[in-house]
Amino acid sequence: MLTLLYLLALHVRIKHAVRRQVPGLIAARVVVQWRERTMLSISLWPDLSTIYAMGSVQRHVVGSRIPGRLGVRTSSGVFGFTGDWRRIMFGSPAAAIDPLQPLKNK
């Protein structure tokens, strides 16, 4: 439990450093499943190049090595925009409108 609390505090510090040094971070949140001792870090970015820019933030680079040193198992994934939810879930012919672009009035 102490390790999880430490990682939560570390995440806050890293998030602030990334926000200061990398333009483009839309949002970053942590979801904790306390009983399972699981922490999910979710961040939203406008494009892939801004995700790679996190590699230039020294606090992020150093911080990304800490869980392994503490014996914490980690995994990650990058998920891209795949289209309108109606098309994905129901096969509707809805157009794939980038959610980061303003909607146009008809």
Image: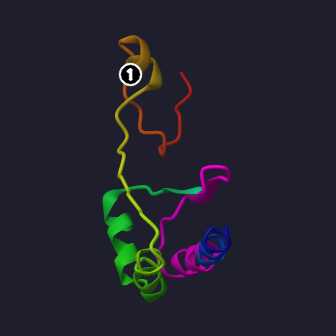
Percent x, y for residue 20? 56, 80
Q: Which residue is mark 1?
A: 88
Mark 1 is surrounded, within 10 Å at the Cα level, by few (under 14), some (14 to 19) or many (20 or more) other residues, namely few
- 39 left or right, relative to 74: right
Name the amino acid type tagged 1.
Ile
Quadrant the N terminus occupies? bottom right
Question: Residue 100: x percent and y percent?
Answer: 48, 46
Q: Is residue 10 above or below residue 47?
A: below
Secondary structure of the residue carrying numbered label 1: helix
66 and 23: which one is in front? 66
What residue is shown at x 42% (from left), y 64% (from top)? 73
Confirm whether the magenta stretch covers residue 49.
Answer: no
The spot of residue 18 in percent (x, y) is 51, 76
Magenta run includes residue 12 = yes
Q: Where is residue 32? Give x, y as percent.
A: 64, 54
70 or 14: nearer the viewer: 70
Which residues are drawn in magenta? 11-37
Q: Residue at x 60, y 57 (%)?
A: 37
Q: Is residue 92 visible?
A: no
Question: Would you say residue 16 is visible in this rendering?
Answer: yes
Note whether 91 is above or below 18 in the view shown. above
The answer to which image quadrant residue 6 occupies is bottom right
Choose between 4 and 59: the one closer to the eye.
Answer: 4
